[in-house]
Image: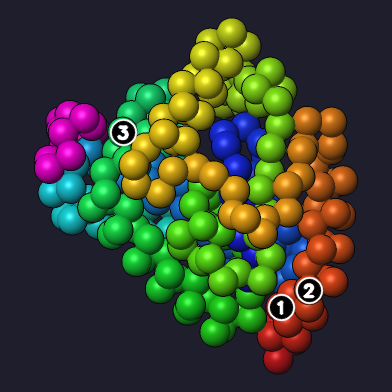
Amino acid sequence: MVALDGPSGTGKTTVARKLAQRLGAGYLDTGAMYRMVTLAVLRAGVDPADPAAVAEVADRAEFGIGTSPDRPEIRLAGEDVAADIRGPEVTKAVSPVSAVPHVRELLVARQRRIIEDVVAHRGGIVVEGRDIGTVVAPDSPLKVFLTASADVRASRRSTQDTAAGRQSSVADALASVERRDHLDSTRAASPLRAADDAVHVDTSELSIDQVIVALSELASHRGILEGCNAEVAR
């Protein structure tokens, strides 16, 4: 298993999916799970700052997430919400929803079950998030913490938003990135931080391909590449 953590805009999602494809492993986007709960909260008309109400929505939410790196499905009550969870309303509300202890307990338990199942069937999985190496899977044989400067992350986020049809200036994106960093790193429940034994990779001046090559080599050195490929070949 590869635990891939880091703040917004470091390239986690793209790197995690491509790395999983290269390793022949499964893939899990834990951030999408928190976004799905956030979308459910917003659709229920609940205040994201009301922990008790958010917890109730989380308990009732029916959502599913795929583990194929080629086409990971994201469904809420059977509806494809892959685009909806990336909207500005969800992005603004996901931090307070993610900070609710009950939400984290609920999703961490589910994430661990998914990881166990995928590893048993595929031999390995790449999991991305903000607390994978510290909370969800602290025994992962490879923990990576992606970083990048705030300016680079803001530029990437602005480009992504524009490509998705959402207007976002670099200045707006920078404010959003810095706000999210602060909320994620200061929350009481599972704050964003690197595991003590995580490998730090600064992606500021690296291409996606360069990051994938570096992480593939790390995975190979730790026997992860062989384990995944052996399971796929069966």
Dot in front, 1 or 2: 2
Inter-mark Cα distance, 1 to 3: 36 Å
Left or right: 76, with 158 as reference point: left
Dot in front, 1 or 3: 3
Give the number of the disc on residue 96.
Answer: 3
Q: Residues within 10 Å of mark 2 (few under 14, many from 20)?
A: few
Can residue 124 be seen here?
yes
Give the answer, above or below, for where 212 lies relative to 156. below
Looking at the rendering, the stretch of residues picked out in magenta corresponds to: 42-53
Q: Which residue: 65% across, 22% down?
A: 150
Q: Residue furthest bottom?
A: 234
Q: Amino acid at mark 3?
A: Pro
Q: Quadrant of the N terminus?
A: bottom right
Give the number of the disc on residue 228.
Answer: 1
- Front position in the image: 58 or 182: 182
Write down the quadrant of residue 100 in the picture: top left
Q: Amino acid at mark 1?
A: Cys
